[in-house]
Amino acid sequence: MEDCIFCKIINGDFGTEFVYENDDAVVFKDINPKADTHLLVVPRIHVESLNELNDEALLGRLMMTVKEAANKAGLKSYRTVINTGKEAGQEVFHMHIHILSGDIRL
Ligand code: AMP
Ligand code: ZN
């Protein structure tokens, strides 16, 4: 989607390094980390938030992607966060899952 920063990242517009990727999602480091390791799992399709994501199978695969990315990053213990809606702190309206590990400052 035009004007969506995460769509642009997925498109390679900023040359962002993907620490993990598969057919469903890309995973990259948060630019403003709130933990020693702070990754974002971002579906390749543009969906505003969890509220608009109604594909059950994709949602399941995204959670599997969380585990795969955490495993690849060598994380055994981590927190996952999904902010849904402005009042809950969502800033980027392309659904994503945070992975936080280490000293979490959130
Ligand atoms: P949320 O508040 O759940 O919408 O999270 C959005 C996250 O995206 C924040 O933690 C930002 O630091 C992060 N972010 C915004 N722009 C970028 C970017 N260009 N590259 C990596 N992370 C970003
Ligand atoms: Zn998008």
Image (cartoon, rainbow, N blue to C red):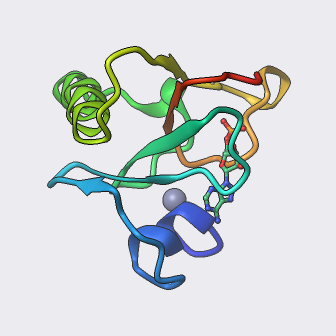
Horizontal relation, residue 67 to residue 3: left or right: left
Q: Observer-nearest residue: 4 or 9?
A: 9
Q: Position of residue 81 (x, y in %)?
A: 56, 21
Foreground: 30 or 42?
Answer: 30
Q: Is residue 89 left or right of residue 80?
A: right
The residue lying furthest to the right in this view is 87
Q: In the image, is residue 72 above or below residue 10?
A: above
**In the shown orientation, is residue 93 left or right of residue 54?**
right
With respect to residue 50, does 33 lie above or below?
A: below
Query: Where is residue 54 drawn, in percent x and y?
Result: 34, 26
Q: Position of residue 50 (x, y in %)?
A: 50, 27
Between residues 42 and 58, which one lies in front from this camera angle? 42
Task: Give me the residue at 65% from left, 32% from top.
Answer: 35
Task: Report whether 37 appears left or right of 62.
Answer: right
Q: Give the residue displayed 65% in from the left and 73% down from the top.
A: 3
Give me the residue at 41% from left, 70% from top: 17
Quadrant in the rendering for residue 75? top left
The location of residue 78, given as percent across then percent down, is 45, 18
